[in-house]
Image (tube, grey):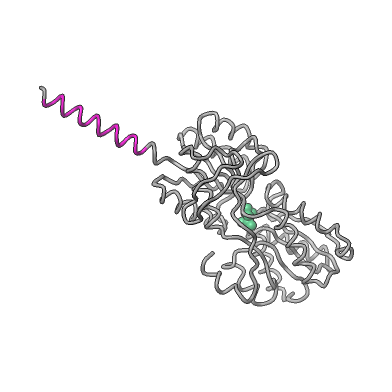
Amino acid sequence: MKKIIIGMLVLLMLFTVVGAAAAQSGKYALVVKSAGNPFMEKVREGFENAISEVGGEAIYKAPAEPTVEAQIIMIEQLITQRVDAIAISANDPEALRPALQKAMSRGIKVLSLDSSVNPNSRMVHVNQADPEQIGRVQIQGIAEMIGGEGQIAVLSATSQATNQNLWIDWMKKELEKPEYDNIELVKVAYGDDLRDKSVSETEALLKSYPDLKGIIAPTTVGIAAAGKVLTDRDLVGEVYLTGLGLPSEMAEYIKNGVSPWMYLWNPIDLGYLAGYAAEGLVAEEITGEAGESFTAGDLGEKEVIKAGEGTEIMLGAPFRFDADNIDQWKEVY
Ligand code: RAM
């Protein structure tokens, strides 16, 4: 009898230890804008690398369509699953508030990355690069390509995307400078980060504005679609393209001259940084207050800084890709 009791006690202790270890390792969810976007797959890769380094379990959620409704359903599922952290690239800055606040009230750590939610819906935002710089360099780029005059259009992602809308606001501010007096922004079109819609929106722009000289696509899905349309229609040197693109998808269009150069940051690093930020919140190493710092694995020491009414962690500066360096990067992301 005594042996049985001791045996049961040992088993109980074992269960407690294993249980504690599992709880500590944690479940970390990444919710992206939509499925089928190669940029998000790279963000996922980095996020999963970080979570595996900290010994946690990564859960990836990608809605079929880039809608906020689909993201709300996913957040509700993650609350029921009792995950430890939710990192989200938002399809709307405000509409996710009730769901994300509910998650936080249940003790789930919430952060946004790439496309932010408003500060009251998150603990911190993981930002790829300074939005002002991202917006301004794209206008500077297209202006140089078209020789400082002519019509330009923007081919964006969804009309509610926080990140693209912020960048477009900065583009418009840059355009106010007198040096761009001869450049006219004729339209902001939305391809919704869907390949086919981005193709048809590019075609519609070319049809509606036969004098169009340049397209800025601040989305990896949009720029690749526009690159293909301009290439297929043999518009090299007639309609220029720049924006934010994945080197792996854009190498061809950089080399053929459709897009002499474009910008981006490392999406794998972005996901990796978000993974470590999530872990920092779960471990209560950080709370999302400005002035805190933590070690983000291979990326080293990172700081939480003030960003408007909220806070953020910055990855770095946007990088310029052109014919001289594209081959180096096209295999990486
Ligand atoms: C698309 C998405 C993403 C954005 C990149 C540049 O893949 O819209 O949110 O950061 O482009």
Tell me, yes or no, whether the highlighted magenta stretch contains residue 10. Answer: yes
In the rendered image, the residue lying farthest to the front is 291
In which quarter of the view is residue 324 placed? bottom right
Residue 89 visible from this viewpoint: no
Which quarter is ligand 1 in?
bottom right
Residue 270, given in percent of the width and then of the height, sits at: 55, 54
Which of the pair 15/280 is nearer the observer? 280
Residue at the spot x=78%, y=61% of the render?
153
Residue at the spot x=61%, y=41% of the render?
290
Viewed as shown, does residue 200 lie left or right of 75? right
Residue 325 visible from this viewpoint: yes
Residue 48, given in percent of the width and then of the height, sits at: 46, 51
Q: In the rendered image, which quarter contains the N terminus?
A: top left
Viewed as shown, does residue 221 lie left or right of 155? left
Residue 267, given in percent of the width and then of the height, sits at: 56, 57
Bounds of the magenta segment: 3-22
